[in-house]
Amino acid sequence: MITIKDMAEIAGVSPTTVANVLHGRTKKMSKETLKKVQDVIDSSNYVSNMGARVLANYGSRIIGVIVNYDRRTENNALADPFYGTIVGALEKEIREHGYYMMLYMAGNIEETVRLACSWNIEGLVALGCTPSDVRKMKQQMKLPVVFIDSYFEDDDYDYCNIGLDDFGGGYEMTNYLIHRGHRRIAFLADEEKPVGVDRERLRGYQRALAENGIPFREQDYVPLSFRKQTRHTRLWEFSKERLKDYTALFFASDFYASDAVNIFQSQGIMVPEDISIVGFDDNVFAEHLRPMLTTVQQHVEDKAYYAFQLLHKLIKGETCEEKNIHLPVKLVIRESVKTLNS
């Protein structure tokens, strides 16, 4: 097997120069030297010893991707279209920039901290964090971290985050339903007390109701559950006992909206003839559902792109002018909403 010393002799440079290229330390190197060494590395099919690099405190070029998924005993996180798409998009960005991705499904913040401290990770992308989770991570870890879809408490920490205009999406979709004649609209999401993106989408929905003179009642927020059996039971009970109180349902995700459509149709409740339904995300469920789902579109791949760009700047010690980016959303109008007579 060829060694760094062998490659240095072929390229006519020092072993340190070859090591610097392998470890990405090329800022002060001329383009000619970099190309000469890289050509030798490529032609030699050299494979670095990652374990040795970590132990030697060289840059590991490992980017950790943490999914704080406390539901893992119940579900496979990557079966969720959002998580599957964004993890795939992050892997592409990380690989194309010469880094390696380490993916971990963390059940709590303590696991995340242990993982980050156990490896010579150069940076971390964290998904699915509550405000308290985010604060704990900043308190206990010093490495560069970029969050995705996180909201923060008012404290002294400096956070980097890529998210959406969740509030605007909730607001625009609710206004759309109202303009189609709906005034009895329920909002359905995951938790008894929604947090993060669901809370912001709920706030947007509430603002649109208020601006149109429609009172929001506590019972208009319907908590579901990530547990399939519990969620299906609640949807079935809702359809029997309370569905008649509404003309439209706004689900905080396409996944839950599609679940509801299937359950309702199994009971002879048709969409949109009997009830209008909308979602949020515009993922694969929205297009494959029948009728196709009206929803709020987000581009998950853009989140991955901007998250890595921001993290890469932090790793290189560069200044990030914009640290809390909220990407735009737009309505996608399909077939799941009925227009009511004025």
Image (spheres, rainbow, N blue to C red):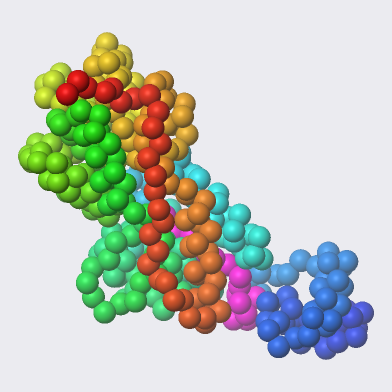
Classify the position of the C terminus by image quarter.
Answer: top left
Residue at 61 percent of width and 72 percent of height: 60
The magenta-colored residue range is 53-68
Q: In this rendering, would 39 be left or right of 20? A: right
Which of the two residues, 298 or 338, is positioned nearer the viewer here? 338
Residue 337: % across, % down? 30, 26
Vertical relation: 299 (above or below) 267 = below
Residue at 33 percent of width and 63 percent of height: 109
Residue at 75 percent of width and 86 percent of height: 29
Considering every residue shown, the one lying at the far top of the view is 268
The question of residue 93 being in magenta is answered with no
Residue 118: % across, % down? 48, 71
Which of the two residues, 260 or 11, is positioned nearer the viewer here? 260
Q: Is residue 123 visible?
A: yes
- Which corner quadrant of the image does residue 145 belong to? bottom left
Residue 119: % across, % down? 52, 70
